Image: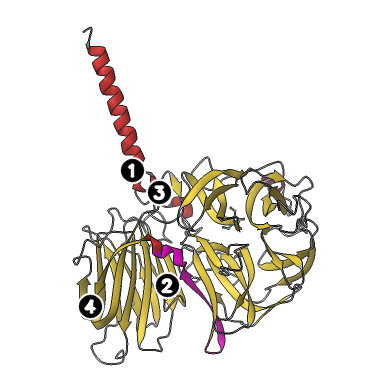
Amino acid sequence: MKNSFPRFGAVLIFIIICSYAVCQQQGPNKEQYRPSYHFTPAAHWMNDPNGLVYYEGEYHLFYQYYPEASVWGPMHWGHAVSKDLLHWKHLPIALYPDSLGYIFSGSAVIDHDNTSGLGTKQNPPMIAIFAYHNPKLEKSGSNQYQYQGLAYSLDKGRTWTKYAKNPVVPNPGIRDFRDPKVIWDAETQKWILVLAAGDQIQFYSSPNLINWNLETSFGKSLGAHGGVWECPDLFPLEVKGTHDKKWVLLVSLNPGGPNGGSASQYFVGDFDGHQFKPDNTPTRWVDYGKDNYAGVTWSDIPASDGRRIFLGWMSNWQYAERVPTETWRSATTIPRELNLIRENNEYLLTSQPVKELAKLRIDSVKMRLTKVNGAYDISKQKTFGKSPLEIIITFNTKNRNSAGFAKKFGIKLSNEIKEEVLIGYDLKQKQFFVNRKKSGKVSFSDAFPGIFTAPWELKGNTLEMHLFVDEASVELFGQQGRVLLTEIFFPAKPYSQLSVFTEDGKIEVKECEVWKLNSIW
Ligand code: FRU
């Protein structure tokens, strides 16, 4: 009896140490559906990416965050930084709600010349301009419950001071008035602020980020108007292969997306610091998928890099609060490089996975030229069924008009309990598709199961699909980033099998390479 307590104590301490070690080892990505390489908050609710800005070797990612539950609530700005766009370090909450309201979406810039006077030239301020949403004013019946505020940081985004005379853009009497994105326009030497006002966009200009003048409004009878406009972004891009400069205006829309619910459209045109004049009139979508919303691009990427890097919220307001993850909700998309090409007499915005992602590749398997009729199991070659995976597959479509050519073909992710996601091309309907009807848990929302499509007319002799698969998502970059479909899913058991499938005929796979990807944890 005398000796048993120390022994018991030692055993207890041993058990505690072991459980701690196991917890450490498991890390957050061992929770079911926790992505291996997509950004997620450590806990609780996240929606839009905010304040994307690069400064002194760090990519900053702020995001709409509710730290007290895994559903939307009084919004804060969560914060994380990365040196490589892959591995993220969580930092303390950057902005808290205050007497002016919740902190809704917005952007951040580096005020290099200290035009605001809030820092010095030696230590330029990082400036966040965001929407305030005042729930008390909203309840009181006022229309003027959203306005734009400013906060600044002099220590690389670690601590923030709200500007004493907020708001910097008061509400002009428009109910939905939010999501300011600020850019420096080198040509007119002015700051430009673009925000969503109802189902239109407004452009403001300023010499100092504090005093803003309304320039123009845009979009009254252009683009899709199935819902309210949100989270705009405006930036110039050089048209690939030329020195022509065009301006791209991204506009998120909810609802009214091409496959239901939230989605983002874009316009290509000219901007002179005062007015945006679009070249395209038909509606163009950044991504046809249901799960890429409120995406915006990084500010202050060094000229030596020169990329326009985009990040979206990988969910949809139709079901974002009901997806079957418990300790956290939502992930971002992978970072994507945007480019502009001119084809068939029009401008097309392309999205490609950022090149940094190649660093996650561990091991790969290549498929030799193979005819597939029905199904071909790629995962058999190695144990390559399980996510995280990257797949690049090219089909030979030369004989697509001959008898016996598959009507539908693509990639299938599946598990032993017959849950599956099909990602493919439909020859008859002329569209890419993702079918997640039988993907696993789908019943939490009627809007979740379905076949989601992106129109694409085949012209050449090949069709390429580049896929990024994680525990709970697939991102399709079709035809070198010309057509996008991003979809999330929740299988009861992880998908363990990867195959090429065809329906009603056969297909020739010209090339297929599959990489196992590393986890970022
Ligand atoms: C878009 C959005 C924004 C708003 C934020 C609130 O998803 O509705 O318009 O600022 O989310 O969290």
Disc on res. 325: 3
**Whether label 2 touches label 1, CB < 8 Å:** no
**Whether label 4 touches label 3, CB < 8 Å:** no
Q: Give left or right: position of 397 versus 284.
A: left
- Residue at the disc numbered 4: 368
Q: Nearer the viewer, residue 435 or 85?
A: 85
Q: Residues within 10 Å of mark 1 (few under 14, many from 20)?
A: few
Q: Give left or right: position of 298 versus 139.
A: left
SS for dot 3: loop
**Which residue is at 58% across, 63% downward?**
296
Which mark lies nearer to you, 2 or 1? 1
| Kind of residue at disc 1 | Gln
**Which residue is at 36% across, 39% downward?**
24
SS for dot 4: loop
Of the image marks 1 and 4, the number of the one nearer the N terminus: 1
Report x, y in % for residue 507.
25, 82
**Residue sitting at the far top:** 2
Disc on res. 477: 2
**Whether label 3 touches label 1, CB < 8 Å:** no
**Whether label 1 touches label 4, CB < 8 Å:** no
Residue 22 lies in the magenta-colored region = no
Which mark lies nearer to you, 2 or 3? 2
